[in-house]
Image (cartoon, helix red, strand yellow):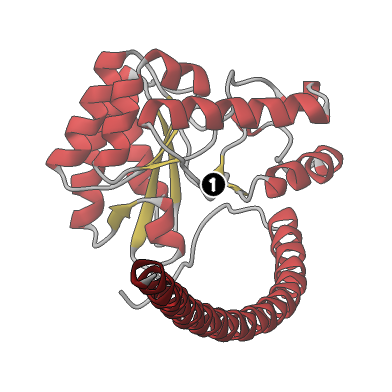
């Protein structure tokens, strides 16, 4: 009887201990769930704060974007007007000489010749410390790219003289554009980068002489589209000496007799012209005139 009684009396204690364990487990689970929920709440609050901050930044970026777009539109309108004015100026300006009050004389040399004479020209200019404006054809640049790369590296200015040296009055407007673009492509390939020139020399002067007003009105806007001014000359040799002895001595004499402040001298990459070049440079300097490039002449202070 006692044994049965003792067994029954211990059973409630086991159930009570089990309930305590379950209770403690539930308490621990509730605490853990509370801690997890608090962490989640804190994370959500932080995320909301970050989103709010991000939205504020995006609003500021949008405002700045709108402001920049307004500025861009204003600048574009201003630049469009400037481009039109610039094009109009280039479409009306034909350069034949510079300011007569300066002591500078531009040396320009056309066409390009064999590699040897091209390099000899650069040697003479380097020896006499003169920067010139050189007008090679695109074909010549393609034939001797290293020579023209050297010319640019040594500070000389290249001017557009068309790709193949045609008579422009025989070409359509599209063909003229192709000639100008072909020259540009040849030069940029030779020097390995972009290149912009301000100056265009029409082959033979064709289309830009007095009495060719119709052709000039047709051609000059195309030149202006490319951002260039057409450049002629006031001292040249081929036509001036066509009935005379064409020698280096006669070339030098003719240049010295006709050049003055602001003059643009037209030479070619021929044996006689290049042979005369050193003497032309030294004799101009003896007369107080300084040989230079077109850019140096046209952008010079007349008092320097």
Q: Residues within 10 Å of mark 1 (few under 14, many from 20)?
A: many
Q: Which residue carries the number 1 mark?
A: 199
Q: Nearer the viewer, residue 30 or 42?
A: 30
Is residue 190 visible in the rendered image? The answer is: yes
Q: Is 272 located above or below residue 11 in the figure?
A: above
Residue 257, percent from left and from top: 37, 47
- SS assignment at label 1: strand
Is residue 249 visible in the rendered image? The answer is: no
Residue at left offset 54%, top offset 36%: 160
Q: How many marks?
A: 1
Q: Nearer the viewer, residue 157 or 273?
A: 157
Residue at left offset 26%, top offset 32%: 150
200 left or right of 154 in image: right
Q: Residue furthest right?
A: 214
Q: Where is residue 156, by image quadrant?
A: top left
Q: Residue furthest front?
A: 1
Q: Is 48 located above or below residue 201 in the figure?
A: below
Q: Can you say which quadrant of the picture contains the N terminus?
A: bottom left
Q: Is 160 located above or below residue 183 in the figure?
A: below
Residue 46, percent from left and from top: 51, 83
Q: Where is residue 210, by image quadrant?
A: top right
Q: Can you say which quadrant of the picture contains the C terminus?
A: bottom left
Residue 31, percent from left and from top: 45, 83
Residue 121, percent from left and from top: 26, 29
260 left or right of 202 in image: left
Residue at left offset 30%, top offset 52%: 291
């Amino acid at each position: 009887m006692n044994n049965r009684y003792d067994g029954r009396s211990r059973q409630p204690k086991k159930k009570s201990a089990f309930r305590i364990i379950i209770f403690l487990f539930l308490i621990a689970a509730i605490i853990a769930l509370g801690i997890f929920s608090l962490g989640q709440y804190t994370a959500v609050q932080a995320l909301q704060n970050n989103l709010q901050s991000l939205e504020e930044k995006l609003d500021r970026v949008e405002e700045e974007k709108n402001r920049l777009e307004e500025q861009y539109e204003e600048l574009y309108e201003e630049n469009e007007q400037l481009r039109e004015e610039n094009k109009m100026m280039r479409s009306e300006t034909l350069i034949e000489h510079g300011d007569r009050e300066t002591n500078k004389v531009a040396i320009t040399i056309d066409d390009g010749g064999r590699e040897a004479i091209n390099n000899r020209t650069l040697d003479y200019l380097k020896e006499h410390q003169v920067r010139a404006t050189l007008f090679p054809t695109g074909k010549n640049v393609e034939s001797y790219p290293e020579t023209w790369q050297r010319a640019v590296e040594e500070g000389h200015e290249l001017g557009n003289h068309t790709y193949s040296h045609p008579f422009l009055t025989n070409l359509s407007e599209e063909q003229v554009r192709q000639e100008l673009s072909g020259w540009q492509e040849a030069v940029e390939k030779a020097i390995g980068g972009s290149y912009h020139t301000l100056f265009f020399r029409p082959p033979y002067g064709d289309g830009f002489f007095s009495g060719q007003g119709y052709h000039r009105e047709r051609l000059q806007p195309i030149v202006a589209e490319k951002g260039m001014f057409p450049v002629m000359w006031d001292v040249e040799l081929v036509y001036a000496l066509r009935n005379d002895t064409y020698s280096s001595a006669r070339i030098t004499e003719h240049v010295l007799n006709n050049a003055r402040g602001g003059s643009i001298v037209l030479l070619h990459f021929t044996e006689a012209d290049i042979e005369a070049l050193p003497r032309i440079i030294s004799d101009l300097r003896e007369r107080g005139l300084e040989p230079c490039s077109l850019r140096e002449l046209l952008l010079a202070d007349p008092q320097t």
